[in-house]
Image: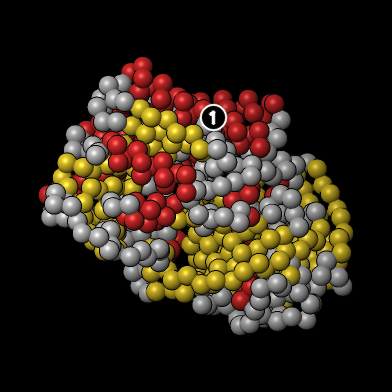
């Protein structure tokens, strides 16, 4: 994350820009508690418990929470007080970052913010001019976005709202667009308001803020920081964001190991099925995917591929991973091989329970870590006829995690000593998880976050183990501008097939395309939300369709 290491607590997330000081929120928010799950690059790293309450003279937002490595941030006390018109009055934060105590105490009056900031033994006092109606958003305290949700409820596209980022001062952000999205939970259906924001701050650039009908925060997406924050009721097993609907869609449930997977089968429309049935493709999301459409930064990657494949004459299955959306199952106890078994269950469903599928022409397509799941499934399921890997990692799990950690430390400009310390801690963690090493010196909160069946299996997984057991043809398709899984992973996968496997392999590099498979400028995560083209590049779909046609003719 591109966050200052010095006074990181208060080097705030600032989003939204400046309306007039007398502007009023559209309505009062509902009071009460909420819990938010926090994800870094789709990996869960922490929780924050939030309470919004009424006071005698206004509103108070409080929270506690904890984020694991590489952020390593613990919120002991957060309290932001606003008056009846949601103008800030005071801010109190007590926290630790990497074991260092951090605190901030700020009062707001007469167009000024007076702050006392403490980092370890250092104390700083400063005063900043600030708009009377500024929203206060300190860094890594996501309860603060409850105030932004209230302010946005009365905003229109083009509005600007002032944000106070202690201790950097005030910035502004513009409301670029406002849309709505249906979100279904077990209890009810929500209509979320989605505000897309651009702000004059090089650190964050863009954000997406979701709120419900009660003016309470649902979700925050910060692509430049690779952070997603979502209220627990919309990420648990019983919830699913209303997704993409295609011609020929059929919603089905497929039996798995003691539960059912929720899936969408898209059948070609406007043409007759071949005598043997439709050739079929199963689209495999990553285990931490938001759902069957494979939506990342507003791009429904798998839904768009499903549309292209069905138009080309393929029956396509996309599904919610276990424990996500409308699928059952317990993700907290699942390993990579369990997700691979879910793919095998879907293949068996196509072969044994549908009469419109060509039983001998079934392929799987996996994106990102879904590529690993597709490989693991194909190594055990001969009824899978071909496997396409899109933007998939090509190294073992331990190496992949360390590679991503080093990239993250480079991105935040960590000092050499901190880099060495963080990497050493990560290696000790891997040794404890994979080789039954000692847990001595590993913080308890980090152990709780990392000691899961999924993460253990991810660290242990090596794609070469699956490849050496496969006979199916493999496609490796990779965007040359992929910065999340850099393009060298594609060549590594191809080498594994050529050197270790019994399969054939075709490598298709796609110029000008990022990890989301859309046209890009730099490929960096920070530009995802600013890209004008949110469609999977036609070259990607064309190459995939042509290859599948040859692999399962």
Q: Is residue 441 left or right of residue 13?
A: left
The part of the image, by quadrant, that contains residue 128 is: bottom right
User: Residue 242's spot in the image, x, y percent?
Assistant: 40, 66
Looking at the image, what colour scheme do you see?
Answer: secondary structure
User: Which quadrant of the figure contains the C terminus?
Assistant: top left
Q: How many marks?
A: 1
**Residue 114 seen in this snapshot:** yes
Q: Position of residue 345 (x, y in %)?
A: 20, 46
Relative to 124, say whether 207 is above or below.
below
As rendered, which of 108 and 231 lies closer to the eye? Answer: 231
Q: Residue at x 51, y 77 (%)?
A: 213
Q: Which residue is rendered at x = 66% and y = 76% of the image?
A: 155
Task: Provide the secondary structure element on which disc 1 rests.
Answer: helix
In which quadrant of the rendered image does the N terminus lie?
top right
In this view, 442 is above or below 355: above
Question: Picture coordinates of residue 491 (x, y %)?
Answer: 46, 25
Identify which residue is drawn at 39% across, 59% down: 236
Instruction: Establish if 44 lies above or below 180.
Output: above
Q: Residues within 10 Å of mark 1 (few under 14, many from 20)?
A: some
Would you name the residue on which mark 1 appears? 403
Residue 482 or 258: which is nearer the viewer? 482
Residue found 29% across the figure and 37% down from its top: 550
**249 over 432 or under it: above or below:** below
Q: Nearer the viewer, residue 441 or 384?
A: 384
Examine the rendering and report whether any part of residue 256 can be seen.
Answer: no
Q: Nearer the viewer, residue 103 or 534?
A: 534
Q: Is residue 4 left or right of residue 322?
A: right
Is 336 left, or right, of 487 in this rendering?
left
* Residue 219 picture location, percent across and down: 53, 62
Residue 151 figure quarter = bottom right
Q: Residue furthest top?
A: 499
């Amino acid at each position: 994350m591109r966050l200052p290491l010095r006074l990181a607590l208060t080097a705030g997330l600032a989003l939204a820009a400046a309306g007039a000081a007398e502007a009023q929120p559209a309505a009062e928010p509902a009071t009460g508690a909420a819990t938010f799950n926090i994800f870094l690059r789709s990996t869960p790293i922490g929780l924050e418990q939030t309470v919004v309450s009424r006071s005698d003279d206004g509103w108070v937002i409080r929270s506690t929470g904890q984020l694991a490595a590489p952020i390593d941030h613990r919120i002991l006390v957060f309290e932001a007080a606003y008056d009846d018109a949601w103008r800030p009055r005071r801010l109190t934060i007590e926290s630790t970052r990497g074991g260092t105590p951090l605190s901030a105490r700020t009062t707001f009056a007469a167009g000024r913010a007076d702050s006392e900031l403490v980092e370890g033994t250092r104390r700083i006092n400063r005063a900043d001019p600030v708009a009377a109606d500024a929203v206060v958003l300190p860094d890594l305290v996501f309860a603060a976005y409850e105030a932004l949700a209230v302010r946005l409820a009365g905003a229109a596209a083009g509005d600007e709202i002032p944000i106070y980022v202690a201790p950097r001062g005030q910035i502004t952000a513009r409301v670029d667009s406002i849309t709505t999205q249906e979100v279904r939970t077990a209890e009810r259906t929500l209509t979320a308001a989605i505000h897309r924001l651009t702000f004059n701050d090089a650190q964050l650039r863009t954000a997406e803020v979701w709120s419900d009908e009660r003016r309470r925060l649902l979700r925050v997406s910060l692509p430049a920081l690779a952070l997603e924050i979502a209220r627990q009721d919309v990420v648990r097993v019983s919830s699913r964001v209303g997704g993409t609907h295609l011609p020929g869609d059929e919603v089905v449930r497929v039996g798995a190991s003691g539960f059912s997977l929720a899936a969408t089968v898209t059948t070609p429309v406007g043409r007759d099925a071949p005598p043997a049935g439709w050739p079929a493709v199963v689209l495999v999301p990553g285990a931490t995917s938001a759902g069957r459409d494979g939506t990342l930064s507003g791009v429904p990657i798998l839904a768009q591929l499903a549309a292209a494949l069905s138009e080309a004459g393929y029956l396509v299955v996309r599904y919610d991973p276990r424990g996500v959306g409308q699928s059952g199952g317990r993700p907290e106890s699942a390993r990579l091989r369990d997700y691979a078994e879910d793919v095998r269950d879907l293949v068996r469903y196509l072969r044994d329970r549908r009469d419109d599928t060509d039983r001998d022409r079934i392929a799987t397509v996996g994106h990102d870590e879904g590529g690993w799941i597709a490989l693991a499934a194909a190594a055990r399921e001969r009824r899978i006829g071909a496997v396409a890997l899109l933007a998939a990692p090509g190294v073992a799990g331990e190496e992949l995690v360390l590679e991503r950690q080093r990239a993250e430390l480079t991105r935040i400009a960590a000092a050499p000593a901190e880099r060495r310390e963080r990497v050493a801690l990560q290696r000790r963690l891997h040794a404890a998880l994979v080789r039954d090493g000692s847990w001595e010196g590993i913080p308890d909160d980090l152990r709780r976050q990392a000691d899961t069946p999924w993460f253990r299996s991810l660290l242990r997984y090596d794609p070469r183990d699956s490849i050496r057991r496969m006979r199916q043809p493999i496609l490796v398709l990779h965007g040359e501008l992929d910065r999340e899984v850099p393009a060298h992973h594609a060549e590594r996968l191809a080498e594994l097939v050529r050197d270790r496997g019994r399969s054939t392999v075709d490598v298709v590099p796609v110029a000008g395309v990022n990890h989301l498979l859309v046209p890009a400028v730099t490929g960096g995560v920070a530009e995802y939300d600013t890209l004008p083209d949110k469609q999977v590049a036609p070259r990607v779909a064309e190459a995939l369709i042509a290859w599948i046609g040859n692999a399962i003719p």
